[in-house]
Image (cartoon, helix red, strand yellow):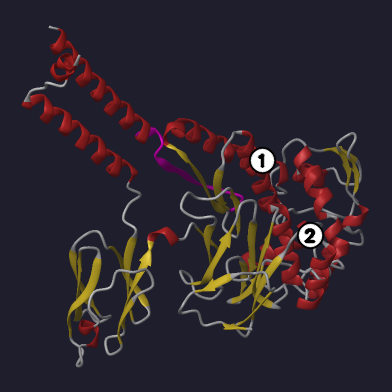
Amino acid sequence: MLIVNVKKISLIFISFIFILSLIYFYMNQNIVVSQTQFIMNTTVEIKLFGKNIDKNKLDKTINKAFNVMKEVEDNSTSYFAYEGNAASLNAHRGEYYRVNQDLIDQLSISIPFYNLTAGEFNIGLFRTVNIWKNASEKNYLPTREETLNSIGKSTPNDIVIDKFNSRVLLPPDMEIDLGGVSKGYSLDKVISFLKNSSVDTALINAGGNIIALGKPVERDYFNIAVQDPEVINKIIGTVKLRDGQAIATSGSYNRYYDIYGKKYSHILSGITGYPTELYKSVTVITNKGIISDILSTSLFLLSIDDGRKLIDKLDYPVEVLYVLNDDTIVKSEGFKIEYSQDNIYKNQ
Amino acid sequence: MNIPKITFIKINKREIIIIIALLILAFASYFIINNKGPGAKAQIEVAQNLYGTYDLSKDQDIIIKDSKGQIIMTAKISNGTIRVITSTCRDKICIKEGAIDLSGQTIVCLPNKVVITVINDNNQIDGVLK
């Protein structure tokens, strides 16, 4: 009797260990939870990396992360008025108006770039943007006088921010458009939300802006392909994006106004209100989403020399890659890129 | 004192088989679950256009056609390697190259404008910046 029991017990014991180890391996399996939504006029993909055991939590977190982004979009849009957002502030220009915290934060960070870029990066271009939108719909070319007049005499320096009471005073002749700011800003907000939700590893891809949190299991970095500015589905090369880094591209290739069949870049000079055609694309790597967004736009509008001076003034680590109109690539020394074999660009 | 110990491990054949089967199952499931998927892939380009990407872990024959739809080459994937088995080119250098399986290795057929490259899945692209 006793012998039989011992055998039975050992069998049960082994089966038990077997099942436990099965469960253990299953739970510890590495998984990626990924979702794509259309936010801020672009396709946004959020990827969360974790263990199978956390799958339900990751599924919930990813939905909340998209909500964080949508909230930033609503708080920052100039096209739909919500209480305390940019469109409402534009409507209440000339008076103190109570705005949401996202708007205060974005204004505080982006206004100094007006002086830093000698006026090229200007958030007060809502009317100018509308002139170009309207012109491309009706197929006429706005005159330089028209765009210049739409900018008005006031500059972003004239915006008064009352942080204590969360109020902003917008000059009466200015309407703001945070198009070159809020996408990058929303990435920072999503990353801090993910950190608070104890997500260690994530990659957020919002078209021209990507930000990384942590690293994938098999590597110390994320492999990011930089798209060729001329040919869709071709890439210039790949870049290693590490924990905390944000990468952003500004180019005339993906967003433009089509007038008489000619493409006009959506990136407008803050001085003239006209598109500039200095480069095919400018790609920036730094450690903050909002800075990557502002800088890719700013550097797109500045000469390489002025761009270098701007970078030197900043406290952020910045690496930059330009694709010039003659297909030459000019980049900072620290911008490490592995060129794809068939890329046509001349590396300088 | 030794006698009870001997009786203790006296297990009959059927039980030994069950225990061994369980152990094998445990090991097998470990490898199945922890398998991160096949590592290497073969990427085939025809006239600088991507023709297709194929798992090196899946044995198969790949018929490669040019832009006019003419069959120009057959590649064979077996045992985690890829090689060219037929080609319409004259000197058949691509066939003589033999089998490749390491990341970065290539077979090039200049007359047919075919490039076969082994790429490591561990180095896959995580995102495209547009």
Residue at 57%, 70% (x, y): give it. Answer: A337
Residue at 31%, 32% (x, y): give it. Answer: A22
Q: Is mark 1 on a helix, strand or loop?
A: helix
Q: Mark 1 points at which residue?
A: A192
Q: Is mark 2 on a helix, strand or loop?
A: loop
Q: In this view, does A115 lie to the left or right of A49?
A: right
Indicate whether B6 appears above or below A306. above
Residue at 74%, 69% (x, y): give it. Answer: A299
Q: Do labels 1 and 2 share a chain?
A: yes
Report, in whole angstroms, how far the alpha carbon at label 1 lies from the one at label 2: 29 Å
Q: Which mark is residue A125?
A: 2
- Give x and y (percent) for residue A251: 63, 69
Q: How crowded is mark 1: few (under 14 residues within 10 Å), some or many (20 or more)?
A: some
Q: Earlier in the sequence, mark 1 or mark 2?
A: 2
- Residue type beneath disc 1: Ser
- Give x and y (percent) for residue B80: 25, 63
Indicate whether B17 appears above or below A321. above
Q: Residue furthest front?
A: B1
Residue A276 is a magenta residue: no
The magenta region covers: A26-41
| Chain designation of label 2 | A
